[in-house]
Image (cartoon, rainbow, N blue to C red):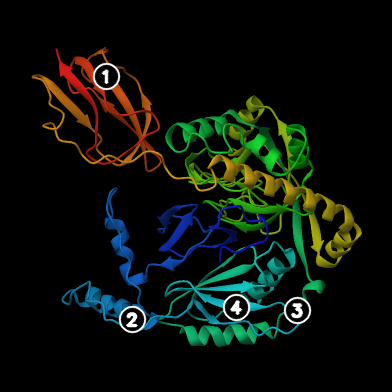
Amino acid sequence: MGSQRWGEAGLHPSNIHDNAYAIGAMDFTGDMPILLGPDGPSLGGFVCPAVIVAADLWKMGQLRPGDTVRFLSISLEEATRLELTQDTAIESLTTPLDPPTTASPVLEAPIVVPSNAQENEISVVYRVAGDKYLLVEYGLPILDLELRFRVHALIENLRLRCPAGILDLTPGIRSLQIHYDNRVLSLAGLLEMLRSAEEELPAVDLMEVPTRIVYLPLSWDDPATQLAIDKYMAGVRKDAPWCPSNIEFIRRINGLDSIEEVRKIVFDASYLVLGLGDVYLGAPVATPLDPRHRLVTTKYNPARTWTPENAVGIGGAYMCVYGMEGPGGYQFVGRTLQMWNRWRQTAQFTDGKPWLLRFFDQIRFFPVSTAELETIRTDFLHGRYVLDIREDTFRIADYRHFLAKEADDIALFRDQQRQAFAEERERWIQSGQANWINDVTVAEDTSDIDLNLAAGARSLASPLAGSIWKILVKAGDHVQANDTLIILESMKMEMTIEAPFSGVVDRLLCREGEAVSTGQNMLILTET
């Protein structure tokens, strides 16, 4: 699944063209695995090799920082049996809620129906994503807008059928994830329906869709994104190749001569929205219509723990506007206005929908200052700032004509990108950054006896696993009770470590940017 063409989806093997995420999926964001719960993103550009079955999702809610998770491979039939047993237990409140798992054969591969496409036909495969989801994938793992239109045609066909058991349809770049209730609609029945639908889909070259040109303000290299980079360098990875400037990294990896060239491309591009819900709350994943505007980058590895709301970033060949604060991996170029309005309906937020954008909208940015953006953001949610939105139609036939006309110039630009991409990767290899490993070993809990504490001295330990964001004291400092000594960052939250009494800082046992485990000693304080 991580296989792709030279970097359109990113550089790390975990990077893929965005597709929908199943609840319970194990998502590899670079080298870091994350279990996605019901409050996770709808889709994203990282590989998901496994999914927790529905009957065991409740266990995710019991996990705490520092817990160890192990997985057991089971068959779809066993997953269904577990869920039915759980349903009975909940109904009767007498049988055990968590029945023993029966050993059973598992799928040899997640692809349940391989493609049998003939020459010049679009291939399609059906990939199991746990016991409640099926991923329909079209074509090769490349950025091809015609594949997204094929997905759109399939969605429209399934909506007309209105089959019982289908709960949700979530499109990706070249895929459609179908969330279904396997107690109502069997996998075999769903596959038969999809085979029938394929025979009814129209030719892509005849397709057209309504589109809107949506002009959005962009604060270039916004201070909020600079703060996120500083936090990343202090608490996650201080020597990443994309730090301290994401924009300089974008320039270098695309073979451009200046940052001004990066800026010009971002503001000249027309970004076609291909997915919504990428990293939460109606966040768009979009790509420039003109391939010469597709700035290709890799994603953060490991991912950021904090991203400002409505930051604008580029990952692979895709642009995303972050719908809310949270983790992330796209390279920052700036910040814009809100994608989601939970408070009220306005001229831009209509029909009871809290999200701003639609599939196949075209986003075009225009520059504003940081101060101007703050005013716009305050006014926008109250309906006092009205966007410039223009209705249009997008036709595949017209787009094919444009690509054919500009083919030679597009090929030259892509050759330049490929060369720069290869050179950047070679720099990583030579500098030892290609296979990054955290240089901080999380220490085991050290007891007070091991520290040989003097009378009146006490060690202060971390109450949870995280990283040291700020150390506000040094050895020899006099502090008062309740003074803040250290600020930790964990699970996208900050926690302060305060002095339990007045005293003198005897020793520091940690450094800014270090990872700490639950119970790990961070400093020694002697009471005065």
Question: What residue is shown at x 64% (from left), y 27% (from top)?
Answer: 370
Amino acid carrying mark 1 in the image: Asp
Instruction: Report, in whole angstroms, how far the alpha carbon at label 1 lies from the one at label 3.
Output: 68 Å
Can residue 336 be seen in this snapshot?
Answer: no
Choose mark 3 or mark 2, whichever is in front: 2
Q: Which residue has dot 4 on it? A: 125
Real-space Cα separation, disc 2 to disc 4, in angstroms: 24 Å
Element type at mark 2: helix
Task: Find disc 2 in the rendering and name its residue.
Answer: 78
> Residue pushed farthest left?
455
**Quarter the C terminus occupies:** top left
- Residue type for callout 4: Val
Where residue 88 sits, quadrant-wise, is: bottom left
The numbered disc on residue 202 is: 3
In the figure, is residue 107 to the left or right of 200? left
In this rendering, does residue 188 appear at all? yes
Horizontal side of 282 relative to 95 (left or right) equals: right
Query: Residue 397 falls in which quadrant of the image?
Result: bottom right
Q: Position of residue 405 (x, y in %)?
A: 91, 59
Left/right placement of residue 248 relative to residue 353 reads right
In contact (CB < 8 Å): disc 1 and disc 2: no
Q: Considering the numbered disc 3 on the image, is that residue within a helix, a strand or a loop?
A: loop
Give the residue at the far right of this rendering.
405
Residue 197 percent coordinates (x, y):
64, 83
Earlier-in-chain disc, 2 versus 4:
2
Few, some or many C-alpha atoms within 10 Å of disc 4 (few <14, some 14-19, many ≥20)? some
Q: Which residue is mark 1?
A: 483
Going from N to C along the chain, the mark reached first, 1 or 3, is 3
